[in-house]
Amino acid sequence: MSEIREVFDELIIFIDEKRVTPGSIARAKRIGTHVYCHSTEIAFGWDLSAMVQACHCDWVFRFDYDEQLSPEWQQEEWRQLLETTEFSHFWCPRRQLVPGGRYLNAAPWYPDFQLRLFRTNLDAVVFPSKLHDQIRVPGPGGYFQHLAIHHHVLWLLPREMRVEKARRYEELLPGGGLGQNCLYEDYSPPTESLPEPVKLDIASELGWMDRLSLHEMSKLSLSVNGMPQKVSTSSWFWLEAEVTNGTDKSVGSFPPFPVRLAYHWIEAATRGTVIYEGNRTALFPSVHPNRATRYTMMIAAPAKAGEYILQTTMVQEHVCWFESARPDILQEFRVLVGP
């Protein structure tokens, strides 16, 4: 946390007295502006509203003990965004680090945008009441591209502790605890080395995606490779995807009309739709004009065994599927899904 103290004007630390480890309070007092101890009956029972009220600045950045700021936060230029923006809050991409100084660079672990930076003078902020809820802040929000958070829990905790954490998540929020994200080894997701720090360009740091015309959609193409012939039911797997952008604007997964990779599952025999709204994969970073960018596309297999056809495509949320503008963007792969 020492580098965080160098980035922000004040560092207020809240410690759960029932779960604190020896020496933590003393260390917190050495680096924090203020240290508050509180007690909850269950883990994740914090009163974020009371925590924010203890802050004296116009903006608050919330982070957890097992997180770290990316090096770009050390550049003072990011503060210009707070001085000139009309946004009330900002979302940060978060990388899940694993052993070897690498991170999981595929959905659902990345980019995992988190709403962490927001104004304190807003009356209508809604704070989470249950596990994995996001803070809801009124007004427009911005999405950072390089000002990121690094999450260390996957390598800090041994697997047996992460198994227990996943069990506790499921107990607190049945069916939605996302405990499987703690047990990444079970899915063999692709990893990547941490990127080199970049010089912030404030003019382009915030991502934004306008509505594409059908003509512009027709200038984007998608090539997908690496499809296995057989997969297990309900399994996750990843494909290599390359998006080529023939337009004069950057295309990415930012509001108000994010563009994402997507897919449909249909039955091979009848061509009847089994899953239409397949999981999304973010175009992050964006595909720049007249460039091609590679992505790792996440696919979830159907729960029922059988022979299927996977259709890969793209979608602009709140607008349309790309096959409406360019039917040949659909690629089909025949897949046997078994137990």
Image (cartoon, rainbow, N blue to C red):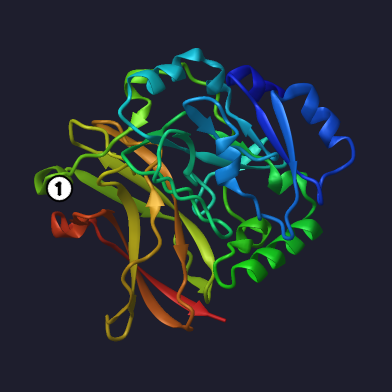
Question: Most extreme residue toward the top, as rendered?
Answer: 76
Element at label 1: loop
Nearer-the-camera pick, 159 or 81: 81
159 on left or right of 192? right
Q: Quadrant of the N terminus?
A: top right
**Where in the figure is residue 191, as x and y percent of width and height?**
59, 44
Quarter of the image holding residue 232? bottom right
Residues 113 and 327: in front is: 113
Residue at x 68%, y 41% (from the top left corner): 152
- Does residue 104 show up? no
Q: Residue at x 48, y 83 (%)?
A: 305
* Residue 221 in the image: above or below residue 306: above
Q: Is residue 195 left or right of residue 44?
A: left
Q: Which quarter of the rendering shows the C terminus? A: bottom right
**Residue 65: where, in percent of width, then height?**
70, 39
Image point 15% across, 55% down: which residue?
326
One can see residue 139 in this view: yes
Please give the name of the residue rendered at 50% of the width and 47% of the height, measured from the top-left corner: 112
Looking at the image, which residue sits at the far right?
22
The residue type indicated by label 1 comes to: Ser
Residue to which mark 1 is pinned: 218
